[in-house]
């Protein structure tokens, strides 16, 4: 990890001291091992704003030349300050620090747009791009996407073998990957053709590895070489897709076709190929990865709370009578809405909101110099006792009496940069749950501990083993057998 550069202002935010020999590296490694547990401990020790290392000198996310250090923050007032000041708190591309090397060689050139898109734009550029993208996610468009969601979910549910143990995390990845590809590209990639998604996953998984930081040489056998190969492969596939759409006239109902046609009202400008490539990558990753994790955690929580599962199935069957929900019927399923909201509160699929200060600012009573990385903890905010009594309880009924602000409950962020696909994601999660739960009972199988993993997203480290049964309402089976560090986030039998 880079150490603080002499001319940079150091952070005054309190935090654990770096070590004499290794500097802040042990702090970074502890964070990487279990970000939620480590930062929870830091918040308990130092308060709602804490530095990863006292004095700074760390870099996790920023691609800017100067990075004084990293701070973690939580609580609605800090969320409000960060989310409502997009001119002060900038977003960075999903490639993080690797974006700095985009001009290094011809092979690195695709990093100019790979996983950049709307995440890499700030201020006026972000407003312009978001305005151009909004029609593709307008609620009037959701109806056409819903039909695809139902068809793909039905196809994937047909493949589940009754009596067999499934890795539910993989199943949810597959169904949301297909939905994202159909809605985004207009093409159902099916079970066999998920290559584009796999390329993206492999590249994203490599980005955080220590070998990428210390052995960044474009030589066969080294991770940087493999990473650039994956990026090139993805770029080639996406360009071929754009060419095919142009050849067909790109007058189709998917997001990419709409983005290829939109024009700026004032200038008449269309999105460039680089802008299209950037947007498609981030929508694809964000659009299926987060939904898959939200679904996996929700089904896990329901498997351990038989009375809630019983009540939810009563609601689904009384309204839907075994059928897939229509958009109108989704509004008639209040318990389903509360279950999803409570699941995303207690086990946030996206636990962090990363930003970099674009100018000197004040946050939580401390001065932050330009370039400071600020990680706002959605997970920690969602577990604050003053906001949510008994926060580790999975209790959907709390949503009958609470209406938290967007700064107290923000699974999709808040402010001008609130997730553009939030409506799409909520609809997708509800449709899949409604169809799956009417048809099957999923029994938790304790093959592996349920440990959380990931920084940008939170997923089950060892997958999620569930035995598939026809829906027989035997909800007590498999309850109370969970091991793993997920138990420090949610009360389980």
Image (cartoon, rainbow, N blue to C red):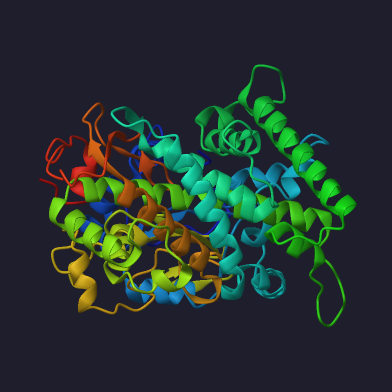
- Front residue of 285/362: it is 285
Q: Residue furthest bottom?
A: 266
The answer to whether one can see residue 89 in this image is yes
- Residue in view at x 21 percent, y 76 percent: 400
Residue sitting at x 30%, y 77%: 404
Residue 52: x %, y % from top left: 38, 50
Q: How many badges with numbers are in the image?
A: 0
- Vertical relation: 236 (above or below) 361: above
Across and down, in percent, residue 282 comes to: 62, 53
Task: Give the image location of residue 54, x and y in percent.
Answer: 37, 52
Decide if residue 52 is in sight here: no
Q: Classify residue 58 as left or right of residue 489.
A: right
In the foreground, 355 or 238: 238
Quarter of the image where the C terminus is located: top left
Residue 7 position (above or below residue 3): below
The image quarter in which residue 213 lies: top right
Q: Could you say which quadrant of the image residue 20 lies in?
A: top left
User: Looking at the rendering, which quadrant does residue 119 occupy?
Assistant: bottom right
Q: Residue 45 vs residue 367: left or right?
A: left
- x and y, in percent, of residue 22 in the image: 41, 33
Q: Nearer the viewer, residue 26 or 413?
A: 413
Position of residue 321 in the picture relative to residue 235 (left or right): left
Residue visible at 21% across and 30% down in the picture:
446
Question: Residue farthest to the top?
Answer: 221
Q: What residue is drawn where x is 17% and y is 37%? A: 482
């Amino acid at each position: 990890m880079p150490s603080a550069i002499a001319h940079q202002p150091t952070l005054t935010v309190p935090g654990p001291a770096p070590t004499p020999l290794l500097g802040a590296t042990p702090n970074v490694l502890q964070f990487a091992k279990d970000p939620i547990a480590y930062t929870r401990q830091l918040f308990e020790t130092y308060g709602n704003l804490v530095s990863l290392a006292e004095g700074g000198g760390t870099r996790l996310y920023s691609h800017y030349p100067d990075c004084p250090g990293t701070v973690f923050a939580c609580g609605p007032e800090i969320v409000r300050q960060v989310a409502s000041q997009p001119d002060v708190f900038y977003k960075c591309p999903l490639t993080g620090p690797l974006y700095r090397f985009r001009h290094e060689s011809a092979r690195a050139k695709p990093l100019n747009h790979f996983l950049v898109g709307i995440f890499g734009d700030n201020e006026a550029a972000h407003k312009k791009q978001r305005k151009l993208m909004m029609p593709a996610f307008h609620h009037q468009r959701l109806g056409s996407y819903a039909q695809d969601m139902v068809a793909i979910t039905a196809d994937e549910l047909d493949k589940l073998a009754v009596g067999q143990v499934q890795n539910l995390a993989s199943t949810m990845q597959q169904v949301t990957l297909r939905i994202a590809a159909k809605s985004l590209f207009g093409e159902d990639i099916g079970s066999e053709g998920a290559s584009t998604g796999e390329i993206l996953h492999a590249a994203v998984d490599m980005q955080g590895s220590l070998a990428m930081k210390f052995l960044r040489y474009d030589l066969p056998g080294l991770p940087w070489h493999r990473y650039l190969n994956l990026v090139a492969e993805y770029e080639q596939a996406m360009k071929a897709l754009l060419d095919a759409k142009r050849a067909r006239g790109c007058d189709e109902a998917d997001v990419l076709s709409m983005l290829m046609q939109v024009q700026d009202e004032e200038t008449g400008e269309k999105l460039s190929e680089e802008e299209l490539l950037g947007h498609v990558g981030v929508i694809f990753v964000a659009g299926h990865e987060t939904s898959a994790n939200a679904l996996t955690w929700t089904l896990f929580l329901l498997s351990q709370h038989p009375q809630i599962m019983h009540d939810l199935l009563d609601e689904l069957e009384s309204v839907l009578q075994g059928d897939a929900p229509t958009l109108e019927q989704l509004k008639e399923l209040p318990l389903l809405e509360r279950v999803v909201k409570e699941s995303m509160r207690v086990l946030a699929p996206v636990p962090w909101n990363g930003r970099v200060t674009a100018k000197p600012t004040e946050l939580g009573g401390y001065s932050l110099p330009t370039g400071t990385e600020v990680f706002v903890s959605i997970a920690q905010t969602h577990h604050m006792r003053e906001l949510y009594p008994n926060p580790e309880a999975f209790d959907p009924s709390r949503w009958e009496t609470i209406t938290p602000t967007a700064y107290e409950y923000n699974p999709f962020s808040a402010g001008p940069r609130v997730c553009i696909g939030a409506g799409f994601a909520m609809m997708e999660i509800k449709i899949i749950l409604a169809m799956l739960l009417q048809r099957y009972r999923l029994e938790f199988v304790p093959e592996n501990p349920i440990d959380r993993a990931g920084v940008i997203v939170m997923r089950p480290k060892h997958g999620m083993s569930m035995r598939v049964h026809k829906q027989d309402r035997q909800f007590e089976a498999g309850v109370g057998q969970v091991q793993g560090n997920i138990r420090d986030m949610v009360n389980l039998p």
